[in-house]
C-alpha cells in the first residue's frame, strides 16, 4: 500500500489566492482527518470524516476554510482567500478505526506570501 | 475534556544513553494512548499504542511505554538511543468509548549527540 498520499508537497501562493490541498487515504480506511501544524499552535485537528461524511469541523478556523470528501478515495481542503497566517504544514491522516492509530501523509507545506 | 501534557519541550541525550519522554493525560476513564514520532519533513508515524491489558507495551524501533493509571502517565522509553532517533515525539490520547478523535500533546523534540 502506498500509504496516505498528499499533494502538492509544497505550495507557495500569494495572499488572496485560492489554495486546494488534496489527500488520498489508504484504501479501506473509513476515517479521514485533516490537521494543521505550526510552531505556535502545534498540531490542530481541523476536520474529520467518517465514511465520507464530515463528523466534526469545529477546528476549522473560519469560513475561508472548507473540506470535502466526495468519495472514499479522495478529499480536499480548500482555503479561499488565503492569508499569510494560513502558512503551515497541513497533514491528512486516515484510519480503519481510530483506536488502531492514524496513518499520516507526508504533509503539504503551505506558504502564503 | 481530555488533554495531554508533554512537559519537556526539548531533550538532549548522548548516543547510547537511555531515554525517557514524559506524557501525562487528563481523562476520567481508561484512555487509549499513543506515541507518534515525526522526523524532519515527514508525517507522524505510530510508535506504539495502549488500550488495555499489560501496562508495558512494546513498539517499533526498540521503544516501549508504560501506562501508570495512578500517575496518569504514559512515558516513552528506550534503553539505548541511536542518532537516528533524533526527531519530534508526540503523545496522544483518545476516549475509550469514542476514539474517533485523538488529542495530541505539544511534542518533545529529541536531539542526540554523538
Image (spheres, coloured by chain):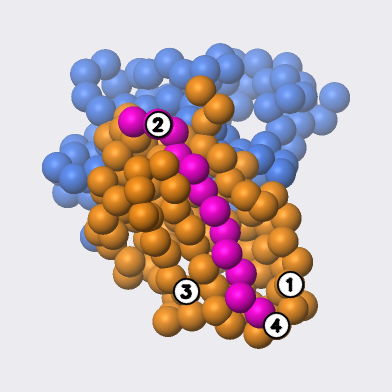
> On the picture, is A52 further left or further right than A91?
left
Q: Are marks 3 and 1 in contact (CB under 8 Å)?
A: no
**Residue A68, horizontal then vertical, whole percent:** 39, 61
Task: Give the Cα distance between marks 1 and 4.
Answer: 7 Å
Task: Give the Cα distance between marks 3 and 1.
Answer: 16 Å
Q: Are marks 1 and 2 in contact (CB under 8 Å)?
A: no
Q: Earlier in the sequence, mark 2 or mark 4?
A: 4
Q: Are marks 2 and 4 in contact (CB under 8 Å)?
A: no
According to the colouring, which chain is blue? Answer: B
According to the colouring, which chain is orange? Answer: A
Identify the chain of the residue marked 2, using the numbered disc in the image. A
Q: Are marks 3 and 1 on the same chain?
A: yes
| Residue range highlighted in magenta | A17-28
Q: Image quadrant for the N terminus of chain B? A: bottom left
Q: Which residue is mark 2?
A: A27
Between A77 and A113, the one nearer to me in the picture: A77
Task: Give the Cα distance between marks 4 and 3.
Answer: 14 Å
In the rendered image, which quarter is residue B44 located in?
Answer: top right
Question: Which of pointers 3 and 2 indicates the residue nearer the eye?
Answer: 2
Q: Which mark is residue A65?
A: 3
Q: Earlier in the sequence, mark 3 or mark 2?
A: 2
Q: Which residue is mark 1?
A: A13
Q: Are marks 1 and 4 in contact (CB under 8 Å)?
A: yes
Q: Which residue is mark 4?
A: A15
Amino acid at each position: 500500500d502506498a500509504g496516505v498520499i498528499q499533494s502538492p508537497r509544497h505550495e507557495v501562493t500569494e495572499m488572496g489566492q485560492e489554495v486546494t490541498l488534496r489527500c488520498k487515504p489508504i484504501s479501506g480506511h473509513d476515517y479521514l482527518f485533516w490537521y494543521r501544524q505550526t510552531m505556535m499552535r502545534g498540531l490542530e485537528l481541523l476536520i474529520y470524516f467518517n465514511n465520507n461524511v464530515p463528523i466534526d469541523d469545529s477546528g476549522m478556523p473560519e469560513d475561508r476554510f472548507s473540506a470535502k470528501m466526495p468519495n472514499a478515495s479522495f478529499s480536499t481542503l480548500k482555503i479561499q482567500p488565503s492569508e499569510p497566517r494560513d502558512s503551515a504544514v497541513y497533514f491528512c491522516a486516515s484510519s480503519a478505526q481510530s483506536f488502531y492509530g492514524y496513518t499520516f501523509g507526508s504533509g503539504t507545506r503551505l506558504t502564503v506570501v | 475534556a481530555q488533554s495531554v501534557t508533554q512537559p519537556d519541550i526539548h531533550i538532549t541525550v548522548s548516543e547510547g544513553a537511555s531515554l525517557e519522554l514524559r506524557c501525562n493525560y487528563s481523562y476520567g476513564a481508561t484512555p487509549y494512548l499513543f506515541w507518534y514520532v515525526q522526523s524532519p519533513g515527514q508525517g507522524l508515524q505510530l510508535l506504539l499504542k495502549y488500550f488495555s491489558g499489560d501496562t508495558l507495551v512494546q513498539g517499533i524501533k526498540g521503544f516501549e511505554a508504560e501506562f501508570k493509571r495512578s500517575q496518569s502517565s504514559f512515558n516513552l522509553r528506550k534503553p539505548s538511543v541511536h542518532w537516528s532517533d533524533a526527531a519530534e515525539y508526540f503523545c496522544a490520547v483518545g476516549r475509550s468509548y469514542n476514539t474517533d478523535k485523538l488529542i495530541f500533546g505539544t511534542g518533545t523534540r529529541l536531539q542526540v549527540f554523538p
